[in-house]
Amino acid sequence: MTARIGVLFVCLGNICRSPLAKFVFADLVTRRRVADRFAIDSCGTGAWHAGEGADPRTEAVARKYGLDVAHRARQLRPHVDFDHFHYLIGMDLDNHRRLLETGAPSDRVFLLRSFDPELAGRPHHEIIVPDPYYGGEDGFEKMYHMVRAGCEGLLEHALARHG
């Protein structure tokens, strides 16, 4: 595993939720002046959008909050990613299950919103980031706030755990 704290955000196609989480987390570590301590990426469990940029609605909400939107979708690479990342962060139960099914170490697989302190102790089915792909733009705004709270908690957790 890398000496830097590796964080991999995972969703279905890597164009909506996981890129936004990557954008938000990268911004948070930059603002905290700890970016050099992290290796951050995102991927999808499927290859439908490999090589594409983020969904335009994801880019729009990211730009609204001043985030960098540089992104190229890719599929999960279990034999590389599981060795490289300390945190394998799924957006929903399907992503979480798929990570485990492909051999991810269970102690490194999390749901993003499990790091949101306001959701502490809630069951997994209540702390997912729903896929906004088939909905309207309001779903992307809601997703941003869910992702932001989860990323803030994840950053605090990672810094406390890794010193």
Image (cartoon, rainbow, N blue to C red):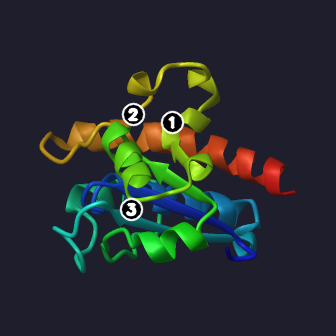
**Can you say whether 41 is above or below 101 in the image?**
below
Q: Which residue is mark 3?
A: 19
Q: Amino acid at mark 2?
A: Ile
Q: Quadrant of the N terminus?
A: bottom right
In front of the other: 20 or 3? 3
Q: Residue at x 22, y 76 (%)?
A: 52
Q: Residue 65, image x and y in percent? A: 46, 54
- Residue extending farthest to the left is 134
Q: Residue at x 64, y 61 (%)?
A: 86
**Can you say whether 55 is above or below 71 in the image?**
above
Q: Which residue is mark 1?
A: 113
Q: Quadrant of the C terminus?
A: bottom right
Disc 1 + disc 2, Cβ < 8 Å: yes
Res 128 label = 2
Q: Residue 128, image x and y in percent? A: 39, 33
Give me the C-alpha separation between circle 1 and circle 2. Answer: 6 Å
In front of the other: 158 or 69? 158
Q: Give whichever of discs 1 and 2 has the lower sequence position.
A: 1
Q: Amino acid at mark 3?
A: Pro
**Which is more foreground, mark 3 or mark 2?**
2
Q: Give the SS element for disc 2.
A: loop
Q: Residues within 10 Å of mark 1 (few under 14, many from 20)?
A: many
Q: Give whichever of discs 1 and 3 has the lower sequence position.
A: 3
In front of the other: 27 or 52? 52
Disc 1 + disc 3, Cβ < 8 Å: no
